[in-house]
Image: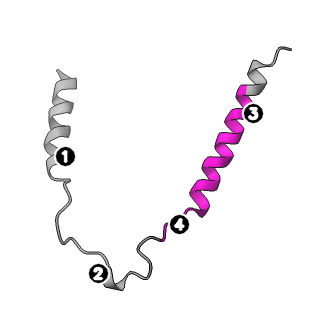
Amino acid sequence: MLKNLFLASALLLAFGAQAQPGSGGPAPDKVPDPTAVPLDGGASLLLAGGIGYAVRRLRQRRPR
């Protein structure tokens, strides 16, 4: 019962969270480079995490 109530309330609240057109933000002509994406911090953290995970898995596979 509680699970169904939570699901119904989550679905009802999701309708109010939809994006509205014209909600603000910089105008397209004011953006210096629309294709610029900051990949410096997040990509390096993902790469370091992937390397750490791979090392861990390789150590677990090696017989002792």
Q: Amino acid at mark 1?
A: Ala
Q: Nearer the viewer, mark 1 or mark 2?
A: 2
* C-alpha gap between disc 1 and disc 4: 29 Å
34 or 40: which is nearer to us? 34
Q: Which mark is residue 42?
A: none
Q: Quadrant of the C terminus?
A: top right
For image coordinates 65% across by 43% down, the residue present is 49
Q: Quadrant of the N terminus?
A: top left
Tag 4 or tag 2, which sits nearer the N-term?
Answer: 2
Tag 3 or tag 4, which sits nearer the N-term?
Answer: 4
Q: Which residue is mark 3?
A: 55
Q: SS of the residue at dot 2?
A: loop
Give neighbour class at mark 1: few <14, some 14-19, many 20+ (Cα, 10 Å).
few
Q: Which residue is mark 2?
A: 27
Tag 4 or tag 1, which sits nearer the N-term?
Answer: 1
Please identify the quarter of the rendering in which residue 9 is found. Answer: top left
Q: Nearer the viewer, mark 1 or mark 4?
A: 4
Q: Which residues are drawn in magenta?
A: 36-57
Q: SS of the residue at dot 1?
A: helix
Q: Position of residue 37 (x, y in %)?
A: 49, 66
